[in-house]
């Protein structure tokens, strides 16, 4: 592989991981709570284990945002906020 190709692939990888870090999956006890943080709609796929998924929300972008809304943040491979 050429050096320029390797550099380009590394740049894409770094940019992709920066975008992934900004993504926070939010869950709430009710759909109304999801709507209060700006969710477009609610998903019910994980209702028994995590709560209602707040799909399309744009207000919680970090653990600090999650805590500001009174939530509990769990950060591992992905960041999840439980409000």
Image (spheres, rainbow, N blue to C red):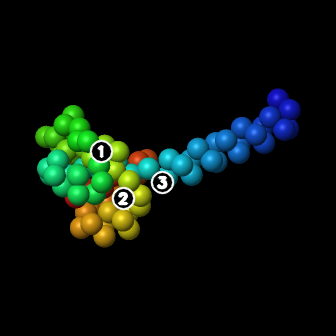
Q: Where is residue 38 drawn, in percent x and y?
A: 30, 54
For the residues labelled 1 and 2, say whether their Cβ atoms are less than 8 Å apart.
no
Q: Nearer the viewer, mark 1 or mark 2?
A: 1
Residue at 50%, 47% (x, y): give it.
Answer: 20
What is the secondary structure assignment of the residue under circle 3? helix
Along the line of sight, which residue is nearer the eye, 1 or 60?
Answer: 60
In the image: residue 33, left or right of residue 63: left
| Mark 1 secondary-structure assignment | loop
Tag count in the figure? 3
- What residue sits 71% from the left and 43% below the top? 10
Between the residue at mark 1 and the residue at mark 2, the CA separation in whole angstroms equals 11 Å
Is residue 60 shown left or right of residue 22? left
Against 26, is 3 above or below?
above
**Can you tell which mark lies on residue 40?**
1
Circle 1: is it few (<14), some (14-19), or many (20+) Cα within 10 Å?
A: few
12 or 69: which is nearer to us? 69
Residue depicted at 29% across the width and 49% down the height: 39
Q: Which residue is mark 2?
A: 59
Percent of width and height locating residue 28: 20, 52
Callout 2 crowding tier (Cα within 10 Å): few <14, some 14–19, many ≥20: some
- Asked whether the residues under the numbered discs 2 and 3 touch, taking CB atoms below 8 Å apart as contact, a structural biologist would say no
Q: Give the residue drawn at x 26%, y 62%.
A: 72
Q: Quadrant of residue 41?
A: top left
- In the displayed structure, does residue 22 sit left or right of residue 5? left
Mark 1 touches mark 3? (CB < 8 Å): no
Residue tagged by mark 3?
A: 22
């Amino acid at each position: 592989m050429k050096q320029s190709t390797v550099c380009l692939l590394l740049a894409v990888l770094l940019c992709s991981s920066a975008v992934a870090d900004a993504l926070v999956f939010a869950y709430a006890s009710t759909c109304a709570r999801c709507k209060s943080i700006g969710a477009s709609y609610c998903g019910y796929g994980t209702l028994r284990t995590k709560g209602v998924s707040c799909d399309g929300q744009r207000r919680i972008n970090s653990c600090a945002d999650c805590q500001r809304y009174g939530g509990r943040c769990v950060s591992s491979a992905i960041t999840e906020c439980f409000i």
